[in-house]
Amino acid sequence: MKLASLPQGRDGRLIVVSDDLAWYADADHIVPTMQALLDDWDRYFPQIEALSIELAHAAIPRRRFHEREACAPLPRAYQWVDGSAYVNHVELMHKAHGADLPASFWTDPLMYQGGSDGFCGARDPIHIADPAWGGDFEAEIVVVTGDVPQGASPQQALGHIRLVGLINDVSLRNLMPGELAKGYGFVQSKPASHLSPAFVTPAALGAAWQCGRLSGTLMVDLNGQPFGRVEAGEECTFDFGTLIAHLAKTRSIGAGTIIGSGTVSNRDPDGSPGRPVPQGGRGYACIAEQRTVETLATGEAVTPFLKAGDTVRMEMRDAKGKSIFGAIDQTVVLG
Amino acid sequence: MKLASLPQGRDGRLIVVSDDLAWYADADHIVPTMQALLDDWDRYFPQIEALSIELAHAAIPRRRFHEREACAPLPRAYQWVDGSAYVNHVELMHKAHGADLPASFWTDPLMYQGGSDGFCGARDPIHIADPAWGGDFEAEIVVVTGDVPQGASPQQALGHIRLVGLINDVSLRNLMPGELAKGYGFVQSKPASHLSPAFVTPAALGAAWQCGRLSGTLMVDLNGQPFGRVEAGEECTFDFGTLIAHLAKTRSIGAGTIIGSGTVSNRDPDGSPGRPVPQGGRGYACIAEQRTVETLATGEAVTPFLKAGDTVRMEMRDAKGKSIFGAIDQTVVLG
């Protein structure tokens, strides 16, 4: 089942979207918003699922779904916590600052609390007030949870995953070293993130969803050119069950919590940091990685951070080549 | 005007409370929840204020307000960001780890994103699953904002403060050094926080609210004994306008964002870290400060962190000795 939200008020209104993302049916007569559905999942899910089946059979009135008309599935959420499941990314970011990766980072997930009071839609522009901040994208997988009790095991946590989607976790690279040095996480260096047009139930992902990991190629384009063709199912050190259990170690988690995988990142088959796509590699899901690889290779980063007018696109397709979550497709606007 | 929430669903139902916290009137026929009021403040505030005036004149049906029956004013919020306005606290915490305070901490606010998906009520027990985690309380002032545009100045930010309250920002001290070393802020070391029974408009605070700082004695009792009698209006390096503007530097802030002052903390008049209340000092608003002062003085911390059955109370009173926000008054429960 695929769900999305159309703009209405602060929280949008819930719609059910067909598997091919071509059609939708209103769902807000059953439950008004995606958050309200997540709040009372067991009560509403059967009716929403029945609606989804009727939509698939064209047995109810349906309308054309246009990704550009959707707002973020959750235009705001009660929690957004981003992990670092792809430790290759973290290792590259450490190298960028001349630091070695602590060995514990391979066993103890790195996670930070992000701002969840406003998520942008997939076609909303990336607003960056000051180009000197070093704007960057980060393509990631996210899951949305129901209520998770304190102390849940990774295995138990998997059972509380309601939905899966994509995020562009916009980052301001030049503000990050100062905030990391403080130790208190990211406050200014992470502006609003952008969510994929649709969120999808794990069941609808089929074999691509296994044990809390999503397999498939996350396609990232910068200015219409392939920038990343990273494999989300590979080198994913921490599955989502482990990330959720990490967060739930000391407290329960409320329904509608969004958990991110961190930037999807692969090494090269020879064990070195990945090569750019034009050089036959899988490329990168953020600019900072490419800059780090450039610096390691030549002593100088040449790929600039985001500039006004740049376009960024993120998408995953299923085995039949159809878009799973719809595309995040954006233009950078300064100011 | 004073507002509170009574338990109902996930978000409570809004009530207006009399200045003396003795009476309340239902407000959910005007707007159902405190979040909904904050979402549409300009629309609903006149009606809620009129209700408050009628309550003050006993011109409408009213009921006894019992602090113990209230849930958190915002049982969940879209954002919780805690600052460190009282740099004396931060300096003591650095000393506890044998580190010097960076000079920039006096001019650049330290802030972290906290979990906002669940706030406990003022009389709810403090649940700590493992006593080895080193449970502690932190008594702080909070404000709740409306929408704040990106780039708002400290002065502009002050105009977006809707409500003021207290928080017990529960901390797990023994988990903090590991998380601080990661640089990504607090994920496991900050379980759910507890909010005061009532939140109060800045206007209702009168002269105690000046330029984004609240004056008055924050009374903290541990096991029925005075533990802190700290002055919230003194040594508050960053006013709330500055904290909000810091958060809003790179992104807008959504209505209902809760911003904390950090642990209220005063030095001794001679410039040394504060002395305990029984020794004639103002004491402390968290156990960790007292332990640090003990360690600096004798080489050993003797005050234990929270144990099962401990009671913690936090309250501020106005010039007439009346409770402003009601009391946070809790018992520690392990498990």
Image (cartoon, coloured by chain):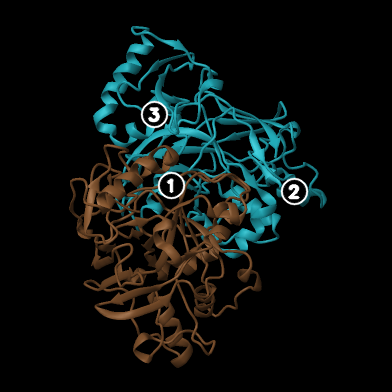
Chain colours: A cyan, B brown
Q: Residue at x 43, y 42 (%)?
A: B41
Q: Residues within 10 Å of mark 3 (few under 14, many from 20)?
A: some
Image quadrant in which you'd find residue A222: top right
Left or right placement of residue B241 versus residue B114 in this view: right
Left or right placement of residue A273 versus residue A204 in this view: right
Q: Nearer the viewer, mark 1 or mark 3?
A: 1
| Quarter of the image that includes the C terminus of chain A | top right
Q: Nearer the viewer, mark 2 or mark 1?
A: 1
User: At label 2, which amino acid type do we have?
Assistant: Ala
On screen, A206 above or below A150? above
Image coordinates for residue A169, horizontal then vertical, percent = 57, 41
Image coordinates for residue B32, horizontal then vertical, percent = 30, 39
SS assignment at label 3: loop
In the foreground, B23 or B242: B23
* Distance of label 1 from label 3 (alpha carbons): 29 Å
Provide the chain ID for the residue under circle 3: A
Mark seen at residue B256: 1
* Distance of label 2 from label 3 (alpha carbons): 39 Å
SS assignment at label 1: loop
Provide the chain ID for the residue under circle 1: B
Q: Residues within 10 Å of mark 1 (few under 14, many from 20)?
A: many
Pointer 2 with pointer 3, Cβ within 8 A = no
Residue A43 appears in the figure: yes
User: At label 3, which amino acid type do we have?
Assistant: Thr
Check if mark 1 and mark 3 are on a common chain: no
Q: Which residue is mark 2?
A: A132
Mark seen at residue B223: none
Q: Which residue is mark 3?
A: A201
In the foreground, A223 or B110: B110
